[in-house]
Image (cartoon, helix red, strand yellow):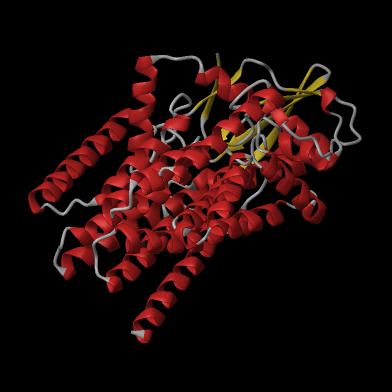
Amino acid sequence: MKKHYLLLSLFFISFLGITYFLYNPCALYFLNDDLVHIPLSSQNFFFQQHSFRVMHEILITIEYKFFAANSVGYHYVQYLIHVLCSVLFFIFSYNLCKQFGTLKESNNILVSVLSAAFFSIYAFHSEAILWILGETASLATLFFLPSAITYMKREQGVFYFICSLVFFQIGLFTYESNWVAPVFICLLSWATVKSKGKPWKIERIYPVIYSGTFIINLIIRKIILGQYGGSYGDNKLFGFNAKQLVYNGICLFVRSFVPPSHSSIYFVIFTVVLFIVLFFVLRLILTKKVGDTLMLVLTLSFLASLIPTLTLGISTHSRESERYLYLPSVFLCLLIIYTLFKLSLSTRVLYATIIVLFAYNIFYSYINTRDYAMASTIAKDYYAYFKKEEHNNDTIIVKDFPQQFNGVPLFRLGFKEGLAWLDNVDTSKILIPADEEMKVSTDYDKAIAKNDFNFSFREDKINSKREISLVFDTTYFSIAEFSKK
């Protein structure tokens, strides 16, 4: 048995090593509004954009003290948070399987290790791991997991329940994804009553207090900020549109399984295949009658975890908003692996399915990192190029401005703030025409056609002004095609 545990431990540790090479923190740089919020955090400016994410702002402030304008340091911290989440996810999975699952003890360990390894390389975590500001999602999950773990130990003493409440509150001060926690906690208490026969009159005190602290947090948000989910979040939250909510819900669900595609046709094909697979899996579960309490809890928790971002939605053409899927993947990854074991497949079929599942996610995680690394290279070269303009008084017009690269936000926000913060460049002489729009023509099918990518800058003298344009290698699957509105 000890040898069995040792092998599983080595397997899990090896996957944590794989994630390092997969996410490659050294290759990443500041992107998009990193260069809006980090300079503000360096000045101890909290509640930015009226958001209630103080814990992340404190973390960024601390990181600035150590790393200043060195982007690699921020990305290493981000990677470390993901590793810690993966380790906590193993503990979380094991406790759930042990308390509410119906597998053998040896299988509980195996399911937990495989689920944690799967979570560590899950393909649709890109923003939460590769974009500094997207770290709010993984940081919030870092507090959600111990809150859930200690809640599952509440019967061992009031200390565990208090710890659960403390971690929950810290998570609420980090990111709104943790709004799903009370739903999960209520489901855990329901499962406890159902599986252990504990009287509901005794058990209900725990979810009532837990949910009550959430309501108190919302009241505090309203008092301090005058809003619940930040300025952007509240505008969306109270802009109720039934059709849009249904569409957003479907997109969030599908994107939890399916990569983005510039082609709507390809995305629809992926979606149809997904629902066919899910139909046959559900049919198999019903036929074999293997559904149990844990599967129901995980399914409902996964669906509920999409609700906090239901009004915001997610892109089907880019990686934008994939941070919304980080916490939901906690429930989804365990649900998928646990269900595969519950279906009682032959050993060969089971492990072949798991290998395909892992290969699929590793491949798309690699694609994500490669494109984030290329976007980082473009951003770094842009700032290096403009560094020489620090003492130049010419007016510069920036043309063909790359707002994104292959679905990765690049300079949609924060470009001028970055010039002022990183290079002390006077941005008043730099003009970016308001009508500069990018028409993306990215083809994800060609994403592995060529590994190298070349681009350069071209300067043109227009009267007394200079125009600077980005010239890219069109033989690649392309940065984008730029055109005027």
Q: Residue at x 37, y 64 (%)?
A: 112
Residue 323 position within the rendered picture, expressed as x and y whole percent measured from the top left: 51, 41
Location of residue 390 (image quadrant): top right
Give the number of callouts: 0
Asked whether 53 or 350 is in front, the reply is 53
Residue 433 position within the rendered picture, expressed as x and y whole percent measured from the top left: 69, 18
Asked whether the viewer can see residue 201, the reply is yes
- Residue 375, compared with residue 107, is above or below; it is above
Asked whether 180 or 244 is in front, the reply is 180
Q: Residue at x 41, y 81 (%)?
A: 6
- Residue 406, compared with residue 164, is above or below; it is above
Residue 102 position within the rendered picture, expressed as x and y whole percent measured from the top left: 24, 61
Residue 214 position within the rendered picture, expressed as x and y whole percent measured from the top left: 55, 36
Asked whether the viewer can see residue 405, the reply is no
**Quarter that holds the C terminus:** top right
- Residue 453, compared with residue 11, is above or below; it is above
Q: Residue at x 64, y 58 (%)?
A: 76
Location of residue 464 (image quadrant): top right
Asked whether 450 or 416 is in front, the reply is 416
